[in-house]
Image (cartoon, rainbow, N blue to C red):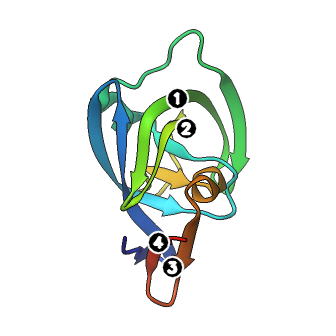
Amino acid sequence: MNLQVIDGLPFVAVTVAFDGRELQIDNVLIDTGSAGTILAADQLLKIGVEYAEDDEVHRIRGVGGVEFVFAKPIERLAVGALHADRFNIEVGAMDYGFEINGIIGVDFLTTVGAVIDMRNLQILPA
């Protein structure tokens, strides 16, 4: 899958499957400095992903500041040909002051064995 560089940062589109429904989400940052994968709550609501009482709530910290998120298992997360089934994501507001709908973190990248080729602006399987 091709990466799109916006303001010097690599972005992709992802596909999320939850409860038998699928959604493509654009403007998702590939971030090797982020341990976890987080997706925007307003996007995920379109396929029924919402907070439930038994979801774990975490406090995360990053360049965008501190945010409370909830953990949610989803059926599948895919970036092009790379995919992880029964994958846990974090869901948050992602109000960072610029257009971003998610962050693909090291958890996903290592699970799928991603190779990030910045010369050719691609993310590929190993």
The quadrant in which residue 3 appears is: bottom left
Indicate the position of residue 10 as horizontal and vertical percent values: 48, 72
51 sits left or right of 15 in the view: right
Vertical relation: 51 (above or below) 97: above
Q: Nearer the viewer, mark 2 or mark 3?
A: 2
Sequence-earlier tag: 1 or 2: 1
Label 4 SS: strand
Label 1 SS: strand
Looking at the rendered structure, the kind of residue marked 4 is Leu
Q: Where is the N terminus found, in terms of image quarters? A: bottom left
User: How much space separates mark 3 and mark 1, taking CA atoms?
Assistant: 31 Å
Q: Are marks 2 and 4 in contact (CB under 8 Å)?
A: no
Looking at the rendered structure, the kind of residue marked 3 is Gly
Q: Are marks 1 and 2 in contact (CB under 8 Å)?
A: yes
Looking at the rendered structure, the kind of residue marked 1 is Pro
Q: Where is the C terminus found, in terms of image quarters? A: bottom right
Q: Nearer the viewer, mark 3 or mark 1?
A: 1
Sequence-earlier tag: 3 or 4: 3
Tag 4 residue: 124
Sequence-earlier tag: 2 or 4: 2
**Numbered tag placed on residue 83 in the rendering:** none
Label 3 SS: loop
Indicate the position of residue 4 as horizontal and vertical percent values: 38, 74
Sequence-earlier tag: 3 or 1: 3
Sequence-earlier tag: 1 or 4: 1
Tag 1 residue: 73
Vertical relation: 107 (above or below) 80: above
Tag 3 residue: 8
